[in-house]
Amino acid sequence: MYMQAQNLNLLGVVGIFLAALVIAGCSSTGTPNEAPPEAEVVEQTPTEQPIREVEPEASDFASDGVTPIDGSGRPISRTFYFDYDKALLRPVDLAALEVHAQILRRNSDRSIVIEGHCDERGTREYNLALGERRANAVASFLSSAGVSSRQVETVSYGEEQPEDPGHDDGSWSRNRRAVVSYR
């Protein structure tokens, strides 16, 4: 009888062990043990795309590379005139200056020199200072229109480089100017 009790004990332990294995095998950890189904491979045949010719972008400059042009291909005024003893921009010049600002913003690799000029009246020193104020008036407008200061340089020639060498009101009015030159 003793043997039977031991066999029953052993069977009980083995039964409990097997039950534990069955329970452990059925438990879920929340992660599937199966590999995800393989994605279907869809073979695509290449389709020919029509070759598009790249249209060159409209240039802001004429063929010489330095003359600014508008959307119609016409040169934009680069000379801006001033009243006697003044450094105020004329309203008629603001549209052209705005086009210059747009060109310079689009072409950040380009720069300009703004030359200030005066007529022959006044002292050399006074005219150099007035020419500088005129060049700075144009530079200030361009800066306020978003042009980088590193793209703009100013210089004053005073009365030294007249557009018209005459000595009358008409000549003097053509000499009171600021000139924008692209580089």
Image (cartoon, rainbow, N blue to C red):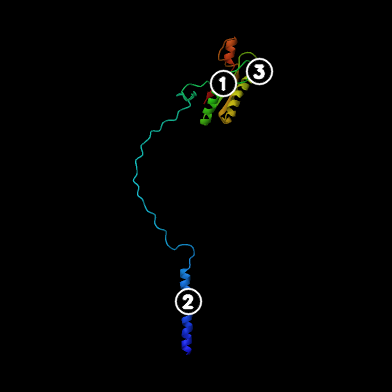
Task: Tell me which corner region of the image, top left, top right, bottom left or bottom right, holds residue 162.
Answer: top right
Left or right of residue 18: residue 152? right
Position of residue 62 relative to residue 21, above or below, is above
Element at label 3: helix
* Residue that mark 1 sits on: 93
Element at label 1: helix
Q: Position of residue 40 (x, y in %)?
A: 37, 53
- Rounded to the nearest whole Å, what is the CA distance between mark 2 and mark 1? 99 Å
- Rounded to the nearest whole Å, what is the CA distance between mark 3 and mark 2? 110 Å
Q: Nearer the viewer, residue 143 or 135?
A: 143
Q: Are marks 3 and 1 in contact (CB under 8 Å)?
A: no
User: How dense is the environment of label 1, judged by Cα within 10 Å: few (below 14), some, or many (20 and up)?
Assistant: some
Mark 3 vs mark 1: which is more N-terminal?
1
Q: Residue at (59%, 13%) from the top-left corner?
A: 173
Between circles 3 and 2, the one closer to the viewer is: 2
Mark 3 vs mark 2: which is more N-terminal?
2
Q: Position of residue 59 (x, y in %)?
A: 46, 27
* Residue that mark 3 sits on: 126
Q: Nearer the viewer, residue 43 or 54?
A: 43
Element at label 2: helix
Q: Amino acid at mark 1?
A: Asp
User: How dense is the environment of label 3, judged by Cα within 10 Å: few (below 14), some, or many (20 and up)?
Assistant: some
Q: Amino acid at mark 3?
A: Tyr
Judge whether residue 107 can be spotted in this image: no
Between circles 3 and 1, the one closer to the viewer is: 1
Q: Position of residue 56 (x, y in %)?
A: 42, 30
Q: Amino acid at mark 2?
A: Phe
Between circles 2 and 1, the one closer to the viewer is: 2
* Residue that mark 2 sits on: 17
User: How dense is the environment of label 2, judged by Cα within 10 Å: few (below 14), some, or many (20 and up)?
Assistant: few
